[in-house]
């Protein structure tokens, strides 16, 4: 029978046998797959592992800092932090089409990854958090037909774009290939990954950039990050985090009239998106207490400059999607 203990033990043996004394690169996203992978590899090969975290500038408030701190200070796994905020923002300057945004962010990710891996390298191996469903889904040409063969690999990022340039070749280390998501969570937990990562809500690769409808600017990012932070705080405060599949804020690029004190305001609306779901394929808007909505709304309007209205999305999926872009 499958147990996490035997899985971990055998994976460590396999990783050591495959890697020997060579170096492995891993792109950390903060999600459960790449974090479990990092823990497992660090256990197996220690400082032959380099974790790289590319900060696109589209994560939630305090998350990049928190992730790096958690890995480095609490778990003593060094992380090469790459601040690429400006270049990602420049890439999508003026872009309003959702798919075009995704494409540009994905391509920039590949470029940054390539540059940084050359700077930090050389590396023989790339560790990927490929799971069993990824394996069966993509009868994938990037998977080597012979073990140990070097191939130009696709980065499994949640960006779903593109492969690495041919001159940047790695062998793959994919110890999670036989696991389903719930098994990854169990493994992660068993080797000490904190619950906040094990049970983290899904977060899209392009992050807040697709939660600001239309044009993304530094100002709008700041507003959304602050509004989103209030949502998360209130949900945590009420102990409701695990009741949702996802719970977040969306910024609409329009303005409406409001009144504050005796001043007329003209500012952005924030949409609250709180949903329950089994797998993200379908979803239901969450029937939350009005008091929760009220607290969140009051706090956002009072605390986040640039927002004067909060609305609640009561659309399920289908016909709506979970994200707004
Ligand atoms: P939708 O909006 O299609 O989302 O109902 C379903 C799930 O997928 C996530 N999502 C993404 N994840 N890159 C990702 O990694 C993306 O571009 C992307 N778009 C949507 C979404 O958060 C939800 O969990």
Image (tube, grey):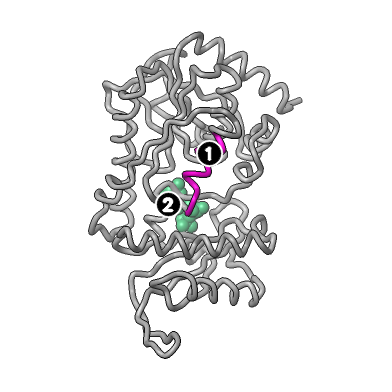
From where the camera sits, is residue 104 visible?
no
Q: Nearer the viewer, residue 15 or 179?
A: 15
Indicate which disc residue 207 carries.
Answer: 2
Task: Say whether residue 293 is left or right of residue 214.
Answer: right
Indicate which disc residue 83 carries.
Answer: none
Q: Which structural element holds mark 2? A: helix
Q: Quadrant of residue 38?
A: top right
Q: Mark 1: is the Cβ under 8 angstroms from ligand 1?
A: no
- Which residue is located at x 25 percent, y 50 percent? 90
> Which residue is under mark 1?
69
| Contact (Cβ within 8 Å) of mark 1 with mark 2 | no
Q: Earlier in the sequence, mark 1 or mark 2?
A: 1
- CA separation in Å, label 1 and label 2: 20 Å
Q: Examine the structure image and report whether residue 66 is included in the region drawn in magenta.
A: yes
| Residue count near mark 1 (Cα–Cα under 10 Å), binned few <14, some 14–19, many ≥20 | some
Q: Is residue 23 above or below residue 82?
A: above
Q: Is residue 199 above or below residue 137?
A: below
Magenta segment: 61-71
Q: Nearer the viewer, residue 169 or 24?
A: 24
From where the camera sits, is residue 229 visible?
yes
Q: Which structural element holds mark 1? A: helix
Tell us which disc is closer to us: 1 or 2. Answer: 1
Tell me the quarter of the image containing the C terminus.
bottom left
- Which residue is located at x 52 percent, y 41 percent? 67
Tell me the quarter of the image containing the N terminus.
top right
């Amino acid at each position: 029978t499958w147990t996490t203990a035997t899985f971990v033990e055998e994976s460590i043996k396999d990783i050591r046998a495959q890697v020997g004394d060579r170096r492995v690169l891993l792109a950390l996203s903060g999600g459960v797959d790449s974090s479990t992978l990092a823990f497992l590899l660090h256990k197996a090969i220690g400082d032959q592992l380099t974790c790289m975290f590319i900060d696109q500038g589209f994560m939630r408030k305090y998350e990049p800092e928190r992730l790096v701190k958690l890995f480095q200070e609490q778990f003593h796994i060094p992380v090469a932090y790459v601040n690429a905020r400006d270049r990602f923002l420049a890439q999508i300057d003026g872009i309003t089409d959702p798919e075009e945004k995704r494409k540009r962010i994905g391509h920039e990710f590949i470029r940054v990854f390539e540059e940084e891996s050359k700077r930090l390298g050389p590396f023989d191996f790339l560790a990927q958090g490929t799971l069993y469903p990824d394996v069966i889904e993509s009868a994938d040409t990037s998977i080597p037909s012979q073990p140990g063969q070097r191939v130009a690999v696709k980065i499994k990022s949640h960006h779903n774009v593109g492969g690495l340039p041919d001159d940047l070749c790695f062998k793959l280390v994919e110890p999670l290939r036989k696991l389903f998501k719930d098994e990854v969570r169990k493994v992660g937990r068993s080797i000490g990954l904190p619950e906040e990562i094990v049970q983290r809500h899904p977060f899209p690769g392009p992050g807040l950039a697709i939660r600001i409808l239309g044009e993304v600017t530094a100002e709008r990012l700041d507003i959304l990050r602050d509004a989103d932070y209030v949502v998360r705080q209130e949900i945590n405060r009420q102990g409701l985090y695990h009741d949702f599949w996802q719970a977040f804020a969306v910024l609409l690029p329009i303005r409406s009239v409001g009144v504050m004190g005796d001043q007329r305001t003209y500012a952005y609306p924030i949409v609250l998106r709180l949903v329950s779901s089994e797998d993200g394929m379908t979803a239901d808007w969450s029937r939350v207490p009005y008091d929760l909505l009220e607290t969140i709304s009051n706090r956002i309007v009072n605390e986040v400059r640039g927002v004067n209205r909060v609305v609640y999305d009561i659309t399920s999926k289908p016909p709506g999607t979970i994200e707004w872009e």
